[in-house]
Image: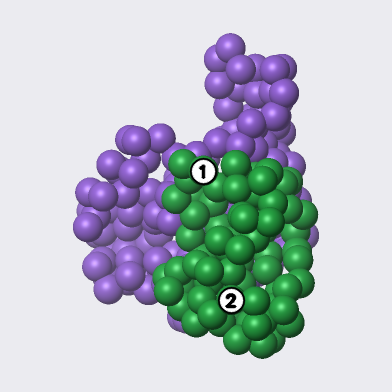
Chain colours: A purple, B green
């Protein structure tokens, strides 16, 4: 997997922004190594969906290089202050992503399951509304830039 | 000069980058307002949208002062994940 940006930041944190397909199985397998003291790993994979009648064939993801890594880094720091995380990974696609392909993978490791689940949930909510990415749906009826739905903001606001 | 970078649907309207004289505006908000007044398509693209800004890779309010050499990013609502 060739990545545009692969930054192991502070201890136990990794951010990958990739122009190439990401493989959740490989990422998850690698993540599960070297997690001494972790009793729980949670992960989330987001996949480009067809979206019913829109018949989406792909997403195009724009991102603000530099700012994206920085804002994700801040969210990782925040997650680590809220939950006792041992290790955390965010891998996000940029560029064109075909329907059925993973667009994001988040993994968290902690001593106990609740911290791993909640931190993973928190980080996915953050990525939906607060990280500088922009999604364009490419479908049967043309192209459309999409914005978060009300429920995405409501999900994010659960953590405030 | 200032470099202004546009993202998402705003990049389709304005292109990725534009250079503008730093002296043209004192704040990020004024800079964008000037651009919108010069360009009806940009003004229409901004209407009804809550745009955010970054200056030199830091999220910044529209009241942030700008100077020569700054890099200003114009950010439509984020949608990742």
**Residue with the most extreme top position:** A53
Viewer-closest of B71 and A30: B71
Are there few (<14), some (14-19), or many (20+) residues within 10 Å of tag 2?
Answer: some
**Chain for disc number 2:** B
* In-image side of B80 versus A129 (left or right): right
Residue A62 percent coordinates (x, y): 66, 51
Are there few (<14), some (14-19), or many (20+) residues within 10 Å of tag 1?
Answer: few
Residue drawn 26% across the image and 66% down it: A83
Q: Is residue A56 above or below residue A46?
A: above
**Tag of residue A71:** none
Are the residues tagged 1 and 2 within 8 Å (C-beta)?
no
**Chain for disc number 1:** B
Residue drawn 45% across the image and 50% down it: B50
Residue drawn 60% across the image and 33% down it: A48
Residue A11 percent coordinates (x, y): 46, 80
Q: Quadrant of the C terminus of chain A?
A: bottom left
Residue A99 percent coordinates (x, y): 67, 29
**Residue with the most extreme front position:** B37
**Residue with the most extreme bottom position:** B68
**Tag of residue B47:** 1
- Please identify the quarter of the rendering in which residue A8 is found: bottom right
Labels 1 and 2: the sequence-earlier one: 2
- Please identify the quarter of the rendering in which residue B23 is found: bottom right
Distance between mark 1 and mark 2 Cα atoms: 21 Å
Q: Quadrant of the N terminus of chain A?
A: bottom right
Mark nearest the camera among 1 and 2 is 2
The residue carrying mark 2 is: B25
Viewer-closest of A93 and B16: B16
Query: Dot 1: what SS?
Result: loop
Q: Are marks 1 and 2 on the same chain?
A: yes
User: Is residue A155 in sight in this rendering?
Assistant: yes
Residue A51 percent coordinates (x, y): 56, 21
């Amino acid at each position: 997997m060739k990545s545009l940006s692969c930054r192991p930041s502070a201890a136990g944190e990794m951010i990958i922004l990739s122009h190439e397909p990401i493989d959740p199985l490989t990422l998850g397998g690698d993540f599960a190594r070297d997690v001494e003291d972790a009793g729980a790993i949670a992960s989330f994979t987001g996949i480009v969906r067809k979206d019913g009648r829109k018949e989406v064939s792909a997403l195009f993801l724009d991102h603000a290089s530099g700012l994206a890594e920085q804002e994700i880094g801040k969210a990782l720091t925040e997650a680590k202050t809220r939950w006792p995380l041992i290790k955390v990974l965010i891998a996000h696609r940029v560029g064109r992503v075909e329907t059925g392909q993973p667009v994001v993978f988040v993994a968290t490791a902690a001593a106990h399951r609740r911290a791993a689940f909640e931190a993973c949930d928190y980080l996915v909510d953050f990525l939906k509304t607060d990280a500088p990415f922009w999604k364009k749906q490419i479908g049967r009826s043309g192209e459309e830039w999409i914005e978060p739905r009300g429920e995405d903001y409501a999900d994010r606001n659960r953590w405030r | 000069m200032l470099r202004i970078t546009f993202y998402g649907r705003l990049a389709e309207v304005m292109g990725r980058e534009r250079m503008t004289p730093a002296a043209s505006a004192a704040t990020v908000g004024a800079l964008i307002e000037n651009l919108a007044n010069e360009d009806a398509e940009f003004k229409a693209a901004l209407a009804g949208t809550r745009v955010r800004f970054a200056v030199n890779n830091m999220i910044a309010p529209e009241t942030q002062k700008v100077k020569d050499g700054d890099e200003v990013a114009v950010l439509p609502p984020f949608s990742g994940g």
